């Protein structure tokens, strides 16, 4: 499993615009990854989502928030909530990301954490 995670992370670095593999990768890391794999995937995905060209990739953003909700540290949760609040201010009509955002607050705490 470790090889699959490592090789896919390398592949994603070379195929920056592939959102389908990226969502499958996040799911794999959540299910089978070590705490370090999860940490790395969260960091890499946050950077990826912060790029303007990926701002509207809802599927990856949803998977990212799910990973944060279920396996993220407190500081990762706080960072993801702040990033998502900024994103939602620009994409106010989106309901999928807003639902994932509310799920984190429900299960992990409020934005006042």
Image: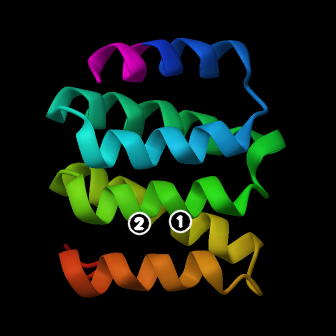
At x 75% / y 52%, what residue is drawn? 55
Q: Classify residue 42 by image quadrant.
A: top left
Q: Secondary structure at mark 2?
A: helix
Q: Residue at x 44, y 62 (%)?
A: 65
For the residue pair 13 and 7, the one nearer the viewer reads as 7
Instruction: List x then y, in percent, for residue 12.
Output: 62, 22
The magenta stretch spans which residues? Answer: 1-6
Marks 1 and 2 close (CB-CB < 8 Å): yes
Left or right: residue 47 versus residue 17 is left
Does the segment drawn in magenta span residue 21?
Answer: no
Q: Which mark is residue 81?
A: 2
Quadrant containing the N terminus in the rendered view: top left
Q: Secondary structure at mark 1?
A: helix
In the image, what residue occupies the spot 61% across and 15% down?
Answer: 11
Residue at the location (79% across, 58% down)?
A: 56
As drawn, the label of residue 84 is 1
Label 2 crowd bin: few (<14), some (14–19), many (20+), radius 10 Å: many
Q: Main secondary structure of the magenta part?
A: helix
- In the image, is 66 to the left or to the right of 62? left
Give the x, y percent position of residue 90: 76, 71
Q: Residue 4 in magenta?
A: yes
Instruction: Say whether residue 2 is visible.
Output: yes
């Amino acid at each position: 499993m470790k090889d699959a995670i490592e090789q896919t992370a390398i592949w994603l670095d070379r195929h920056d615009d592939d959102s389908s593999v990226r969502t499958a990768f996040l799911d794999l890391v959540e299910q089978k990854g070590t705490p370090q794999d999860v940490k790395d995937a969260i960091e890499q995905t946050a950077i990826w989502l912060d790029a303007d060209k990926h701002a509207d990739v809802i599927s990856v953003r949803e998977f990212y928030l799910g990973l944060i909700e279920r396996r993220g540290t407190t500081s990762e949760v706080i960072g993801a909530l702040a990033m998502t609040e900024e994103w939602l201010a620009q994409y106010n009509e989106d309901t999928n990301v807003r639902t994932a955002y509310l799920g984190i607050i429900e299960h992990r705490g409020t934005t006042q954490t």
